Amino acid sequence: MAFAILDTGVYIDHWEHSRHGRVLVAVRRRFVVRQSAVVLSELRRGARTKSALRLVDALRDLSTVIWEPTAEDWWRAGKLIRAIGDAQDWETTKRREFQNDVLIALTAVRHGATVVTTNTNDFEFLAKSIKVRVEDARE
């Protein structure tokens, strides 16, 4: 059984702009989609309307399995963010933004899952370091 985690941007693009429909159908055919606690938190943090909050709440309520980062994932994330951030000469703000992507990627690797994202640039840095499988959701 193959698993996937949908990144935050995929949900936002789909809900707000009806994007990635064909990709999502293909993902559902090939993978069992699991929710990331990090993605759910990002969605909840960004939900600004009642309808957006309802969508996020419904997604959470329908999630029978939610994968979350372990203490070891957090520890490894610090090292990865430092190494990649130094190599790319990133400022502190970019490193902070990158943290959630690292946590999502580490969670995916631990479960043998693929990350489906619209943010392939950041995940490609990670794919070189931790061998996370990444698929681009952009059509």
Image: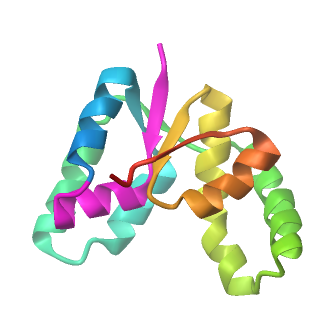
Q: Relative to residue 64, is residue 89 depicted above or below?
A: below
The front one of 122 and 44 is 122
Describe residue 62's horizontal placement relative to residue 78 as left or right: left
Outermost residue to the left: 51
Residue at x-position 81% and y-position 53%: 75
User: Residue 25: image x %, image y %?
Assistant: 24, 34
Q: Relative to residue 99, is residue 134 depicted above or below?
A: above
Describe residue 30's horizontal placement relative to residue 92 as left or right: left
Residue at x-position 67% and y-position 31%: 110
User: Residue 123: image x %, image y %?
Assistant: 63, 54
Residue at x-position 76% and y-position 86%: 91
Magenta span: 1-19
The colour style of the image is: rainbow
Q: Relative to residue 89, is residue 112 depicted above or below?
A: above
The front one of 126 and 48 is 126
Magenta segment: does it hold 94?
Answer: no
User: Residue 61: image x %, image y %?
Assistant: 24, 41
User: Residue 116: image x %, image y %?
Assistant: 46, 44
The front one of 78 and 105 is 105
Magenta segment: does it hold 17?
Answer: yes
Q: Relative to residue 26, is residue 132 depicted above or below?
A: below
Describe residue 14's horizontal placement relative to residue 88 as left or right: left
Outermost residue to the top: 1
Residue 6 position by quadrant: top left
